[in-house]
Every structure is written in structure tokens, then in C-alpha cells.
Amino acid sequence: MAQNAAQTATEERTTLNSSEITAIAHLYRGEVYRSTIWRTRLDTTTNWAVVTLGVALSISFASPDASPLPLVLVGVLIIFFLMQEARRYRYFNVWRARARWMETHFYAPMLHDGNLHMEDNWQKTLADDYMRPRYHVSMMTAIGRRIRRNYLWILMIQSLAFAGKLAVHPTPVENLEQAFRRADVGPLPGEAIVTVGVVYMITWAGIAIWSGQNDKNRALGRRTDSSMG
């Protein structure tokens, strides 16, 4: 009898009644709202990074004798904002993925042919995500995506500004040795500062490239499983 009851429940779960459809509509609105709020928070972090870089540029280029050190130190703040934004992106991606899941498996089929295709068990995937919430992307993937979207340009401007400062102030640079001496920071030689800067840029660019390739592989390998994330 229990087996028959379970079978009957499964057979009944081939569509949704009007109350359930209304509940999902409200749920969708809630997920869109949450994703919008977290998307705004992402923009805020990017704005902080841009503003701090702008301040560093203003200080370093205020006069020919101004130190390029602010352009080095601002890198610490930019990376801090990048980490904050990657963390926020992981939250944003949860709400975005849920809203997108409902769009592709609830609204699109309903508008296309009026059949929710619940035999595909998309509703169970959504239910499992609510019962056992988790991040859909790793921290490294989130960092790579944010670098690709915004931070690679910010880091490039920082690096080019530092190189430009060494090249033109206080007078146009005449040779590589002179540029290294201008890059000296206290007991740290300019060669070390420049080397760290090159590694700094290569590392973040490498993470961005890896993230892009990883996203492509995830998309190619995605079939009928959950596409959340």
C-alpha cells in the first residue's frame, strides 16, 4: 500500500496547481530581488577599488618629485577589495543561479508549450538547493571571474601608471638602471620591486585565463545535470 501511495504521489506530481504556481512566482521575485541587492554590492566594491587607485594616481603624479610608492601600496587595497568582491560574488551567484533555473525550467516551458516538464525533476534540483544550500562556484573561480570582468583593467592601469611614473618623473628616464633606482623603496632595491610587480600581474592574469578556460570546460561538460553556478 505504501508503494502504491508513493507511486500515486509521483504520478500526481506532473503539474502544479494555481496556488503552487503563485508561490513559485513569489519565490522567483524574491530571488531576483536578492540577486539585485548583491549585484549592487559587487558594484560598490569595484567603485572602492577605482577610487583608491584614483587617489594613488593623484598623489604620485601631483608633482615630479612625488614618490611612486602610493601606486605600490594601493595594490594591497585593490587585492583586498578583489577578495571581498569574490566572496560577495559567490553569494550573488547562488541567488542568480536559482532565478535563472526557474526561468529556464518553469517560465520558459510554461510560455512555450504550457508543459512544465516536471518529469525532468528540475523542481527536485531546486528543492535540494534550498534544503542543502551551498556555493555553486569555488573561491578561485569567483576571483577569476571578477578579474576578467573588472579587476584586470584596474591592475593594468595601476601597473602602467607605476611604469609611467618611473619613466617621466622627475625627468625622462635615460636608461634601465636609472628606472630601477627610482623604483627603490627604502632598503628594497628597485629590481626586487619591479620583479614582484611583474609576478603580481602575471599571477592575476593567469588566474583570469584559467578561470575563463574552466568556465568553458564546465559549459561544454554540462548536459542534463544541474547548471546552477
Image (cartoon, grey):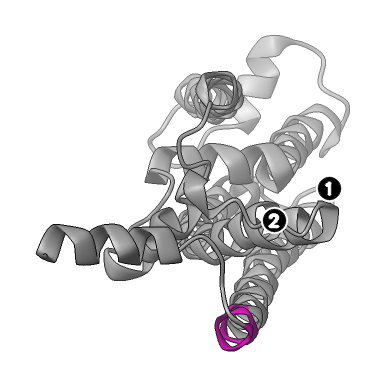
The span shown in magenta is 18-24
Kindly identify the residue that appears in the image at 59 percent across and 55 percent down: 101
Kindly identify the residue that appears in the image at 53 percent across and 41 percent down: 227
Q: Nearer the viewer, residue 141 or 156?
A: 141
Give residue 48's position: percent from left, percent from top.
Answer: 66, 68
Kindly identify the residue that appears in the image at 67 percent across and 74 percent down: 32
Tell me which amino acid carries mark 2.
Asn
Q: Give the image quarter of residue 137.
A: top left
Give residue 13's position: percent from left, percent from top.
Answer: 44, 64
Task: Say if 93 sits above or below 228 in the image.
Answer: below
Q: Is residue 229 visible?
A: no
Residue 45: mark in rendering: none
Q: Is residue 217 magenta?
A: no
Which residue is label 2 attached to? 115
Task: Say if 129 sits above or below 195 in the image.
Answer: below
Q: Is disc 2 placed on a helix, strand or loop?
A: loop
